[in-house]
Structure formats: structure tokens, C-alpha cells
Image (cartoon, rainbow, N blue to C red):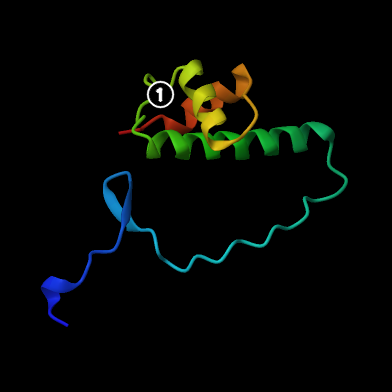
Amino acid sequence: MPAAATKPKPTQSTARRPVPLDLPYAPVAKRPLPRGREREWYVTHNRRLKAMRLAIALLDSGVYTPRQARDETIRSTAARIGVHPPSDTTCRMVRALMCDHH
């Protein structure tokens, strides 16, 4: 088959380089959280995971700076990706994750 007849693979932009969407990613096996920690540790751990998911979704949607990530933007992104609305603390954490240190 000639090279001109082949279709390019679909890609999705994550930052500045295209990433192929058809890579064979295996889901990461979930492990139970460590036992015996204080409740606050689990709350903070889950808040960090949620903030990371939201920061990634915002970056993929074109929101690149903390200034662009207002609470309303973060909460509408949460609704779009199917997570509960984040608290003010989680919104601050999302902005902190997006902060660029040049």
C-alpha cells in the first residue's frame, strides 16, 4: 500500500507534543491505601489525586496558567469529567499544581 494511502493515527495534544491515542495502555492496578494512618492523611491523599485529575483535564482543555483557572472553571471541568465539585481548598491546590516555575 502506498504511503499516501495510509491514514495518520489520531492524536490528542497534551502540552506541546501530540500523543497517539491508540497506544496499548494497561490500566494501573489499584492497590489498597496503607492501613493505620490518621483520617487526615486519607483526606489529603484523595484531595491531591482529585487536584491532579482536574489539573490534567484543565491543561488538556487549554487552560495553562493558574490565572486562567478560576474556581468556576475548575468546578465546570469537574462536572465535565464526572467528579464531585471541588472545595475551595482543592481549587487552590489545582492552581498550585499548574504554577510554572521558570
The percent coordinates of residue 9 (x first, y second) are 29, 63
Q: Identity of the amino acid at label 1?
A: Pro
The percent coordinates of residue 12 (x first, y second) are 34, 50
Residue at the spot 60% in from the left edge and 17% down from the top edge: 88
Q: Is residue 69 shown above or below 40?
A: above
The quadrant in which residue 75 appears is top right
Residue at the spot 54% in from the left edge and 39% down from the top edge: 53
Residue at the spot 23% in from the left edge and 64% down from the top edge: 8
Residue at the spot 61% in from the left edge and 24% down from the top edge: 86
The residue positioned farthest toward the right in the image shown? 36
Q: Report whether 17 appears left or right of 86.
A: left
Q: Is residue 61 shown above or below 75?
A: below
Q: Is residue 47 shown above or below 75?
A: below
The percent coordinates of residue 19 (x first, y second) are 33, 56
Looking at the rendered structure, the secondary structure element under dot 1 is loop
Task: Looking at the picture, tell me which residue is in the foreground, 38 or 68.
Answer: 68
Task: Looking at the picture, tell me which residue is in the foreground, 49 or 81.
Answer: 81
Q: Report whether 53 appears left or right of 101.
A: right
Q: Which residue is mark 1?
A: 66
